[in-house]
Image (tube, rainbow, N blue to C red):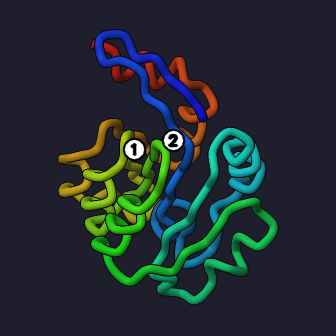
Amino acid sequence: MYTIDIPGRGELQLSHAVLDFNGTLADGGQLLPDLGPLLFRVSSLLSCIILSADSFGSVHNALQAVPVHVEVVKTGKDKALFIEQMAGGVVAVGNGWNDYEMFTRADLSIVTAGPEGAAAKALQVADIFVPNIYVALDLLLNPKKIIATLRL
């Protein structure tokens, strides 16, 4: 369990990081440069699950050397249902319209602009907006930054 005590809001207890693939971790089905080591570090703190429609048929190959679990899902509703069935706190990271419902179920949600931009609908419900996945993963590795952003 990964605990972040946010002044004025209380403790946030996280067990899982659920991440979108295309547009968040990947561009055109290819993992973004230098993400492997960051994902290794995050996976030492949280169980990492990648949810993807696998539009390019590359998610398993792209992540085969990284300690993450991959689930192929069809819709944003599938992502939300996946999170609802998880035990323990969840941080969700994504960029698309299909991440909106996942964000509403997560204990903490981070929307990234990424190579595809960010859907305005996802921005409406996200707890934190960052310019890219590198900043999102850095927040998880440095929880004082999350505290600084979310404190009341």
Mark 2 neighbour density, 10 Å: few (under 14) some (14–19) many (20 or more): many
Q: Position of residue 96 (x, y in %)?
A: 32, 64
Along the line of sight, which residue is nearer the eye, 30 or 55? Answer: 55
Label 2 amino acid? Answer: Ala
Q: Which residue is mark 1?
A: 110
- Image position of 144 (left or right of 107): right
Q: Can you tell which mark lies on residue 136?
A: 2
- Of the 4 image quadrants, the one containing the N terminus is top right
- Image position of 98 (left or right of 29): left
Label 1 amino acid? Answer: Ile
Query: What residue is drawn where x is 55% and y is 48%?
Result: 16
- Image position of 135 (left or right of 99): right
Q: CA gap, disc 1 to disc 2?
A: 7 Å
Q: Position of residue 89 (x, y in %)?
A: 46, 42
State whether residue 91 is above or below residue 35: above
State whether residue 75 is above or below residue 56: above
Q: Position of residue 2 (x, y in %)?
A: 58, 32
Query: What residue is drawn where x is 63% and y is 62%?
Result: 32
Query: What residue is drawn where x is 50% and y is 23%?
Result: 4
Mark 2 lies on a secondary structure that is: helix
Location of residue 56 by image quarter: bottom right
Mark 1 lies on a secondary structure that is: strand
State whether residue 11 is above or below residue 22: above
State whether residue 35 is above or below residue 26: above
Pointer 1 or 2: first along the chain = 1
Whether tag 1 and tag 2 are in contact, CB under 8 A, the answer is: yes
Q: Can you tell which mark lies on residue 80?
A: none
Query: What residue is drawn where x is 54% and y is 70%?
Result: 27
Q: Residue furthest bottom?
A: 57
Q: Position of residue 125 (x, y in %)?
A: 22, 46
